[in-house]
């Protein structure tokens, strides 16, 4: 198996994976967005759709009831007594009355309600939202009256979560059991407290509003509902009319809210079935987050970015489907945090790919530039091997040209280009025959013309390039023997007609040639060479460059080495750079 190397891409991908993993785990552990996670539960309810809810019926105090009875709320308690009598006679398994009876009203009405509850063949659970710190309530006159009537009071509070949505029901409130728990236990089904998390449990809503069988309070009161509707079922009685404002948003509502009694009926169905929706173990969430954070980065090490993202997307969709299937089976998997880790990893993978590509492109460009510069030096060295007297001439020309360019205000980047371009100033000498190039004595006129042709030959070698460095090298090769007064060669250019790079090279080329020993002359002193440069100002050289060069002169030997110390194989500090191409002697002047 091919081992992964520690490349910029590997490092960038590793960072992306680490950030995604840390981000996902941290968000999960601190519960960064509980509302969003709850919203995913709502979406899973929507995807599951509606289901039947046998065993539970709602008797709704609805608009029809108000219309037929022509009474204001609250109704006389004798009406509630009549409804309880009818439900008990029809064989209701339990009657869960979601109407508060905490304050006394008309004595005869209160006694009628009390008698109906105490004689009911079905257990009666009475709702309240008023509970003291010890779990006591004033429903039906208090604890003693409830006991004598064989009724049970229960807390009907359903705390809303973020966004005002009701998703869970409580086991108890201040010691008083919750309405759904009490109703379930009154019907003979005990709900283990262990099935609650933090004393609350998800309501397993059967569907949107009106999913649970609902009949009108008025129809029950008038005996228009068949007994089979209530027989063996828990009947929840409560107000559903919107005018009484007992309507709420739930996990399965959209535009229309759900009435409180129907929410209680859903909670009772949930309690009867042992709270089917249970959260998955926390370690499953941790594994899902880690996998979500790693799949895209790891895949990108073997696949292209698009391929790794597609694979990660397939895995994410697969996890969503698994989460839905688990929800349908009663297990609630954490969804938003693994998907957040997946999204963070996907973004990180793309960013890592671009960062790695940027680094690699820069590295390649740097390597390519270094290779180009090395080729220039090696080509110059190839010429240098044919003219062994000149030593480190090329290196010094480059360094001095760079220094002079900086002295006159060039940018460091342009000066560096000039340093390398100047190495090619005598590249045309590669075509000069050895008998002329290596001739120890003075050249005759014909030989001198051959040597002078090295300027045009060099320009032809370097022509037609789009590279700025090569273009500058061509100008230098062609024009470094031109003179300010127009008496130079090959084109007889004058003044600023001569490219500035060639004018710079001309000054440092002559200066270096004067300081170096040749077979036909001894090395000049620095003072003599500088005097010669100054004398050539306005005739041979650009006066402005001469002035700048003379100001720079005290630092030249320190920065670049003294050519008088660089003959044969002993070149002092400058020998640490590249080897030279050729020198300026009588052949080059």
Image (cartoon, grey):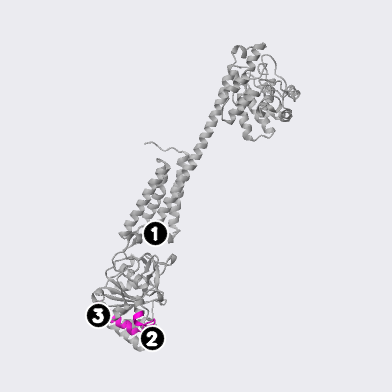
Query: Nearest the camera: 477 or 10?
Result: 477
Query: Nearest the camera: 368 or 74?
Result: 74
Magenta region includes residue 72: yes
Instruction: Tell me which corner region of the image, top left, top right, bottom left or bottom right, holds residue 303.
Output: top left
The x and y percentages for residue 360 are: 49, 37
Instruction: Tell me which corner region of the image, top left, top right, bottom left or bottom right, holds residue 544.
Output: top right
Sequence-first tag of 1 and 2: 1
**Magenta highlight range:** 67-91
Task: Provide the residue designation for mark 3.
Answer: 89
Give the distance between the C-alpha atoms of the residues marked 3 and 1, in whole angstroms. 44 Å
Q: Are marks 1 and 2 in contact (CB under 8 Å)?
A: no
Residue occupying image coordinates x 62% and y 32%: 416
Mark drawn on residue 105: 2
Give the distance between the C-alpha atoms of the residues marked 3 and 2, in whole angstroms. 26 Å
Give the distance between the C-alpha atoms of the residues marked 1 and 2, in whole angstroms. 46 Å
User: How many numbered marks, from 0 up?
Assistant: 3
């Amino acid at each position: 198996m091919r081992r992964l190397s520690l490349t910029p891409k590997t490092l960038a991908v590793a960072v992306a994976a680490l950030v995604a993993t840390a981000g996902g785990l941290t968000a999960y552990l601190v519960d960064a967005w509980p509302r969003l996670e709850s919203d995913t539960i709502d979406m899973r309810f929507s995807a599951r759709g509606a289901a039947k809810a046998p065993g539970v019926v709602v008797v709704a105090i609805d608009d029809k009831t108000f219309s037929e009875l022509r009474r204001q709320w609250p109704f006389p308690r004798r009406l509630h007594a009549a409804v309880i009598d009818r439900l008990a006679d029809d064989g209701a398994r339990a009657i869960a009355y979601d109407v508060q009876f905490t304050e006394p009203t008309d004595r005869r009405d209160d006694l009628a309600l009390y008698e109906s509850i105490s004689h009911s063949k079905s257990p009666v659970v009475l709702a309240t939202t008023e509970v003291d710190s010890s779990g006591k309530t004033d429903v039906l006159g208090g604890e003693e009256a409830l006991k004598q009537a064989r009724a049970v009071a229960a807390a009907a509070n359903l705390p809303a979560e973020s966004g005002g949505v009701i998703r869970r029901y409580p086991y108890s409130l201040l010691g008083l059991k919750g309405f759904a728990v009490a109703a379930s236990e009154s019907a003979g089904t005990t709900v283990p407290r262990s099935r609650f998390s933090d004393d609350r449990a998800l309501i397993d809503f059967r569907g949107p509003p009106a999913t649970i069988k609902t009949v009108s309070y008025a129809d029950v009161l008038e005996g228009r509902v068949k007994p089979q509707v209530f027989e063996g079922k828990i009947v929840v009685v409560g107000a559903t009319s919107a005018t009484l404002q007992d309507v709420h948003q739930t996990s399965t509502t959209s535009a229309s809210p759900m009435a409180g009694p129907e929410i209680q009926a859903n909670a009772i169905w949930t309690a009867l079935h042992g709270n089917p929706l249970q959260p998955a173990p926390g370690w499953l969430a941790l594994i899902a987050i880690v996998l979500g954070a790693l799949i895209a980065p790891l895949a990108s090490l073997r696949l292209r970015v698009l391929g790794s993202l597609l694979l990660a997307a397939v895995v994410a969709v697969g996890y969503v489907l698994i989460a839905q299937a688990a929800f349908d089976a009663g297990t609630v998997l954490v969804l938003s945090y693994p998907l957040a880790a997946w999204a963070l990893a996907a973004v990180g993978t793309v960013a890592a790919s671009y960062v790695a590509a940027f680094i690699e492109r820069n590295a390649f460009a740097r390597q390519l530039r270094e290779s180009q510069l090395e080729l220039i030096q090696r080509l110059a060295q190839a010429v240098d091997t044919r003219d062994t007297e000149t030593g480190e001439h090329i290196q010094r020309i480059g360094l001095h040209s760079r220094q002079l360019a900086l002295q006159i205000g060039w940018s460091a980047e342009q000066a560096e280009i000039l340093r390398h371009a100047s190495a090619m100033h005598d590249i045309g000498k590669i075509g000069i025959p050895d008998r002329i190039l290596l001739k120890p004595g003075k050249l005759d006129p014909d030989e001198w013309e051959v040597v002078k042709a090295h300027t045009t030959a060099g320009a032809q070698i370097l022509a037609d390039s789009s590279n700025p460095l090569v273009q500058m090298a061509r100008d230098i090769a062609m024009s470094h023997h031109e003179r300010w007064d127009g008496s130079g060669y090959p084109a007889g250019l004058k003044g600023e007609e001569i490219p500035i790079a060639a004018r710079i090279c001309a000054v440092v080329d002559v200066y270096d040639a004067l300081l170096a020993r040749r077979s036909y002359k001894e090395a000049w002193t620095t003072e003599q060479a500088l005097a010669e440069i100054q004398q050539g100002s306005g005739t041979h050289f650009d006066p402005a460059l001469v002035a700048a060069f003379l100001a720079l002169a005290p630092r030249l030997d320190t920065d670049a080495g003294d050519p008088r110390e660089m003959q044969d194989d002993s070149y002092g500090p400058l020998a640490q750079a590249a080897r030279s191409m050729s020198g300026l002697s009588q052949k080059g002047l």
